[in-house]
Amino acid sequence: MEDMDPIINNTCVLMNSDGSVNVVTEKQLKLSSMEPGSVLLQLVLSEVCGTDVHLKHGRLDIVPYPIIPGHVAVGRVFATVGSIVDVEGSPVVQGDIVTYLDVIDTCNSCVTCLVDKQTTRCPLRRVLGITCNADSNSIRGLLGGWSSYVYLPPNTKIIRLPEMLPASVFMAGGCGLPTALHAVDRASIRLMDRVIVQGSGPVGLLAAILARLSGALQVIVVGAPAHRLKVVKEFGIDHTISIEEFPDPSKRLAQVQDLTSGHLGDVVIEATGRPEAVTEGMMLCRDGGTYVVVGQYTDNGEVALNPHQMINRKHLTIKGCWGSDFSHFYRGVQFLTKHATSLPWHLLVSQIFELKDADKAIAAVERLEVFKALVKPSQA
Amino acid sequence: MEDMDPIINNTCVLMNSDGSVNVVTEKQLKLSSMEPGSVLLQLVLSEVCGTDVHLKHGRLDIVPYPIIPGHVAVGRVFATVGSIVDVEGSPVVQGDIVTYLDVIDTCNSCVTCLVDKQTTRCPLRRVLGITCNADSNSIRGLLGGWSSYVYLPPNTKIIRLPEMLPASVFMAGGCGLPTALHAVDRASIRLMDRVIVQGSGPVGLLAAILARLSGALQVIVVGAPAHRLKVVKEFGIDHTISIEEFPDPSKRLAQVQDLTSGHLGDVVIEATGRPEAVTEGMMLCRDGGTYVVVGQYTDNGEVALNPHQMINRKHLTIKGCWGSDFSHFYRGVQFLTKHATSLPWHLLVSQIFELKDADKAIAAVERLEVFKALVKPSQA
Amino acid sequence: MEDMDPIINNTCVLMNSDGSVNVVTEKQLKLSSMEPGSVLLQLVLSEVCGTDVHLKHGRLDIVPYPIIPGHVAVGRVFATVGSIVDVEGSPVVQGDIVTYLDVIDTCNSCVTCLVDKQTTRCPLRRVLGITCNADSNSIRGLLGGWSSYVYLPPNTKIIRLPEMLPASVFMAGGCGLPTALHAVDRASIRLMDRVIVQGSGPVGLLAAILARLSGALQVIVVGAPAHRLKVVKEFGIDHTISIEEFPDPSKRLAQVQDLTSGHLGDVVIEATGRPEAVTEGMMLCRDGGTYVVVGQYTDNGEVALNPHQMINRKHLTIKGCWGSDFSHFYRGVQFLTKHATSLPWHLLVSQIFELKDADKAIAAVERLEVFKALVKPSQA
Amino acid sequence: MEDMDPIINNTCVLMNSDGSVNVVTEKQLKLSSMEPGSVLLQLVLSEVCGTDVHLKHGRLDIVPYPIIPGHVAVGRVFATVGSIVDVEGSPVVQGDIVTYLDVIDTCNSCVTCLVDKQTTRCPLRRVLGITCNADSNSIRGLLGGWSSYVYLPPNTKIIRLPEMLPASVFMAGGCGLPTALHAVDRASIRLMDRVIVQGSGPVGLLAAILARLSGALQVIVVGAPAHRLKVVKEFGIDHTISIEEFPDPSKRLAQVQDLTSGHLGDVVIEATGRPEAVTEGMMLCRDGGTYVVVGQYTDNGEVALNPHQMINRKHLTIKGCWGSDFSHFYRGVQFLTKHATSLPWHLLVSQIFELKDADKAIAAVERLEVFKALVKPSQA
């Protein structure tokens, strides 16, 4: 930062409240507005996930449009103001390849944070790429990943990517991994549990992988379409049940009964985003089992629930799971580093789009053509 | 049992699948059919609870009518076959005033009991007075409390009432206490938690009392009618909210917000039996709070649930609670003994009916005239 | 703070590494060195607790002498720099009577805080009056309660005392209450548990009170001397066992067996500071019980442990308990406010010393003459 | 059992209170003394484990010598009285290859079983081969595995070996697996935990394997001798630390610090049987970590413990672990079946002894020559 007032040329994608998406190109922005303790990254890779599709359709009521989408990303440190350290206390310097917790502003000073200890529900908490209003005319407004530069405000938690963890493998985990890890933590899987995962998107697949590596006796994924279930199997998951092949939920229940010798799931994890999956998931749980609902991140309406049959009489424990905190993110990086070469991560990240094609990337994800689309600036 | 073939004259109440209730009077039954390890009691007191009203209306689909209703009761030991001991190993002998766990036949040999450790969901488990088909022509069929004699099959868990615990105080707790204790155990109340209880019937009132005595900062009961809420207050509960006064759930939510300075319930316990209470209860929980659903013991239909708003985003932990086991029953007796004189138990048991008036007793409970009706044989 | 450079005359007590204690009187200090976000209090009341006696004898190896002792205190806001809010977001202004979490500098940025979530073990954490080196020549060094003014650095967590909570009642809880509350949280007391507390100092007494109010079936305190046990009984604790009357641990065990009908403690809480109490406490636990060790805050040596007899075969769960966090402090204030008039708090705070008599106050606590000595400046 | 009074010729090994071991050969015993619900097995394989060495030296004070050692075993059903079913309800018939929970007589009727829910501490519980006095003159006394026939009293929990699980693989898990599984359950390992296991005997090795398959970031085994550590590595464990190479505990601590980047163990599991390992294990735990003590099954004396340094200040959670219950045994069979071919089980069971050579087998285990010695009758 020894330069006098350096300027960057930034290109980014804006998503508006009407669902429109436009690209702002080659905007000249001055570095001098960076705050003490902040970091500016050149984007290496960001992603398009199912949440971005929901955001386009306005299904989350806490989004201050316009935003620059893209929550989890990898970048190269371009500029810092003041000395920056990672969570281990090591300095973060220009040129480092890093990722960051996309959650900022958690206050650690309110009753929710300090007494209830529910930091993912802190009222001040914001998520880059989702609940940060983006001002594309200012460096301080580059608060999302679909951008050639990303601004990390002071106190953003930064992790340098370990050498053994390529950016593309990290992005295969992407935003889904901390979410899946949080869900699996909430599930408290025990050795030899039977685990059912509803949904075969990134969160579902990752939750299934984590359940398998937690020592489950068997893991069953209920999902679609076929090409996703094929990938699920290539990650070593024991069984898949296709909702295309078995559109009737009672048939899927019968399949699960067969596969589990009538025992059903000790643990069921919902990762679909569809309300009707919730009551189906309760059916797939054994009596006294645990059901984690993580996929209902956006509002997709209601489902009819019989609380006698589904909650009381089954003696279920049902756990909602909102967001993730730094521990999930940190352990997610540990996980990917440990398993970087032993799992076929490339199957998740087959398609990379330039920023200007963000709309196509969203469409590909919405059509479930790809597990996840990556985005990167043309020059990266 | 030194007599050669003694005979008893038994009077009992039968409830049939069409909801009809009839009294079988002065039936002569031979003691000789008692099994080794069994106990015959002369009834001292049994009760009519909300479940009995539901059973009359056929709202539980696992009841093998006809039954002799009356699950929890107090009796005087009339006959035993073999030597009987209580859980501490002390002998149980003729003349002892005892109560008993109304649950029998839990197998302790199946995967549900031994591996899943969900004994209240053991498929062989039966509940006296609810899921035991009753043959009023045989001593072995006297498997319910609304009867001058009650038959306790081998291995029924028996507790002698401590001297300091009058039968009427025990029955004030009755079947509701182990249920409420199970619910409060599931809730894991911490010192200074704010606790909301939905429902002011016996389970709701008892859960509120237990929450208060668990060190809650404040306990709020949402219920009706007014005379029940009056009793709730006389048990030292901090606040009541009348659903008659505030028929609109959003007004009740506002009341709870006011009373808790906007914090809502750290713990909410549902004890209403009404499906629509379940979504309301989720609203009354703070983010990251715990919701225990214990009142949906019978099937009263569905409720529309928005899983995004109510489960995922609130990060709730929701726990169903089915039945109770011996630990709840045993600790319930400890609880009542400890608090026998310090709480106004008489407010719960103001009305006692003879067996022949069982129909009137059910009606009184259905009209919510009384907290709980007791039944006893005319000679008791 | 509109004044130009106001000066205060401060008197404080310094404790040195050789155990000497000296009073620094009427030092003139300038307010201008206060940091943005800091608060200066005029002391109302502070305390002398058992830890201060240990500090005098050098039994904690992490103390950067000299220090101004006195961790928990009540003060009147004298000056603030910038706008200060409490945890509910309400402004804290001059004249407010407040207390504060004596723990500062917890970083919320390291692996211990964020991943292990053990904030009471954060390496940067410091405790006012214990692990803060005190410079009595600077306002910024007034980091302990035995002082006419106390400096609260930026981000110190402040709570305004509720109107219903007199300072003397708050100080009766003092530093012992958050510690006791943390210990009782760790113990996870269930309704009808039998609880044994070892130690009848402030932490022991407060843990016993909290256990009783958590719904324990019975609470037994093992301690001395007689006048403390008398106070214990006046707080409604069921039983006391005098270690003066029963100096032989096996006799104390026999007493506990008698009082619990042979069951022993479901939960045992150690609050003595004596190593040999730890193995005795394991003996007082039932098989499969929970033992919380909270009293070993300073180093008093070793004890011989047979891990087969005491840990493995008894299948115990043993929990160390270090310090406390804001939640314990906050809930402690809620607790005292709720019970301000219903418990005889005055029995704990009978003696108040001036700052200049700090040595006498320490001696009185060391001789166990008083439960806790309070200190206050002469003018307060 | 249609024969009139069939006779078997049994050979078994008796262990006496003086540590002597003698073989009783070709004893003629009548089948007619079998009880209803009992099963007689022809032994296929039993084992010699470290506990048997301890029993020979009288290190467990609850053993009613003489006993027939051998707790866990595989047998072929030779005779049954009445209809016998396994835990799934399937009939067990002559010729079936089965194993069984070596724990009998757990009462499920006492306060320990029903209220404290600590069934492994039930006072009536007995373990075949350890706490069953053996009468070698009666079929009913064949209560241990080192025998050509083994008698399973009524209610012994039986599991038929799945076809995919050879007896030798099952015995590789043997008695150590349910113990290790219980310990790992108590440890509540989370994905990406660092786990240290003390001890490289069967329980230590199996706990390490289970920790690895529970998703640990890394697993470190501290043990000896070299040939055992070699096997540990062949099971995929990340690191071993040799106590022969590093006889000084502080050097082993330094090794663990190095291997864990200074973080130490989130979880440490003790499986050594040596008291001094317990304080070392506490040192190997990170602050706020979990320490499970499972190896102190027999009494090997005391260790000096500093409770301030090791328990309180480290804020540890320490869990004793006694015995195992049916769930551990059942899930152990599931585990071995799932991993029967993917792990090199043969490395654990290289040596098989005939009954007459039991003394040699014990000696081989005591010298740590083998991981575990198997025993089988000459004809099996």
Image (cartoon, coloured by chain):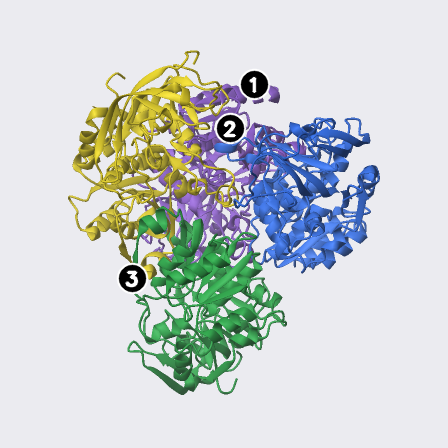
Chain colours: A purple, B blue, C green, D yellow
Q: Is residue D332 something that shows in the picture? A: yes
Q: CA distance from mark 1 to mark 3?
A: 66 Å
Name the element at disc 3.
loop
Disc 2 chain ID: B
Q: Are marks 3 and 2 in contact (CB under 8 Å)?
A: no
Q: Give the amino acid type for the residue marked by disc 1 in the picture.
A: Glu
Give residue D307's position: percent from left, percent from top: 33, 59
* Quadrant assignment, res A246: top right
Q: Is residue A92 something that shows in the picture? A: no
Q: Which residue is mark 1?
A: A244
Q: Nearer the viewer, mark 1 or mark 3?
A: 3
**The N terminus of chain A, quarter of image:** bottom left
Q: Which residue is mark 3?
A: C302
Name the element at disc 2.
loop
Disc 3 chain ID: C
Labels 1 and 3 share a subunit: no
Q: Give the amino acid type for the residue marked by disc 3 in the picture.
A: Glu
Circle 2: is it few (<14), some (14-19), or many (20+) Cα within 10 Å? many
